[in-house]
Each structure stands twice: as C-alpha cells, then as structure tokens.
Image (cartoon, rainbow, N blue to C red):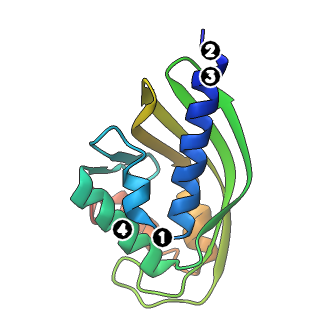
Amino acid sequence: MLDDGLRQRRLALIEEHMNTEVTKEFDRTLATFNGHPRYEIMATGQVFDGDDEVMNYYRTTRTAFPDQRHENVRYHFSDDAVITEFDLLGTNLGEFYGMPPTGKAFRVPIIAVFFFDGERIINERIYFDSASLVTQIGRGELLALAATGELPGQ
C-alpha cells in the first residue's frame, strides 16, 4: 500500500512535470524522471527514449502547438503508478509532421500513466484518440500516414 507521504511527493512531482511542460521549462521536466526519460505514445506507437529523443519530442510538439496546455486534471494512485486524466488543448500554429499550420484548435481527453521507481518517474505512457486530434486541426490525412507506420519516431 502506498503511504501518504510518498503519494504526496509523487503528486507534487507530476504537477511539476505537467506545469513545466506548459511553461516549456523542459530541463525541469526532464529532471522529474529517474535520469532516463521515456515517453510511449500509444495512439501512434511512437517511443521517445532518453534525453535527446524526449527533448526533441518536446520541441517538435511545442513548435506545432505552442499553446499546448492541460485542463481538468484528475489523479488516481496505485502502488507503482499515477494515472492522470485531463483535457489536452492547443492550436496548430507551427509545422506538424512536415505540414504547415492550420491555425485550428483541438481539445482531446488524455490518460497519461506515470510509472514510478520510488519517488522518480521512469516512464510516461499516453493514451488518446489521435483521430480526434488530427481531425479537429484539419489534418485527417495524417491518419493514413500513421497507419503505414511512417510517422517520425515510430
């Protein structure tokens, strides 16, 4: 059973992780991991492993969606993970997979599972409806590209 002290430290770490993603303080975001950051994007099969890949993921997504942010965050705790549910919002104001920006906004529900080893994050696994996101920003053609496995990072 997870003790209350560890639960509170994990919650504070995830809040720092999520807040520094929004403020684009990516060195601080990386510091929330156990020394080896890893993201798994389940909708696309993309895996970003290690400092360089994760930093590139941050830069790429924040170029495409510079106003990316979270709303309505809820937390659920288990012994080795914290599951977060939230709405992810943003506007396509920069290049996205080689395509020019559409200027259109999106709002999609997300589940992010933060896996822990003690007090540090070892992996963030993200689940969301990618079809909803790309349709909302006017880039439905990306669905066919994703189906072929040709998205960068796959």
Closer to viewer: mark 4 or mark 1: 1
Dot 1 or dot 3: first in sequence order is 3
Q: Is residue 75 above or below residue 106?
A: above
Residue depth check, mark 2 versus mark 4: number of the one nearer the observer: 2
Q: Residue at label 2?
A: 3
* CB-based contact (under 8 Å), mark 1 and mark 3: no
What amino acid does circle 2 point to?
Asp
What residue type is disc 4 on? Answer: Leu
Say if mark 1 contacts mark 2, CB within 8 Å: no
Callout 4 touching callout 1 (CB < 8 Å): no
Per the model, the C-alpha gap separating discs 3 and 4 is 45 Å
Mark 1 or 2, closer to the camera? 2
Mark 2 or mark 1, which is nearer the start of the sequence?
2
User: Could you tell me which secondary element the residue under label 1 belongs to?
Assistant: loop
Marks 2 and 4 sit apart, C-alpha to C-alpha, by 45 Å
**Label 4 SS:** helix
Q: Which residue is found at the position 57% from the left and 23% from the top?
A: 6
Q: Which residue is mark 3?
A: 5
Residue name at image x 49 percent, y 21 percent: 80
Q: Position of residue 28 (x, y in %)?
A: 42, 57
Measure the alpha-carbon separation of dots 1 and 3. 28 Å
Q: Amino acid at mark 3?
A: Gly
User: Residue at the location (22% across, 60% down)?
Assistant: 52
- Horizontal and vertical percent for residue 49? 26, 48
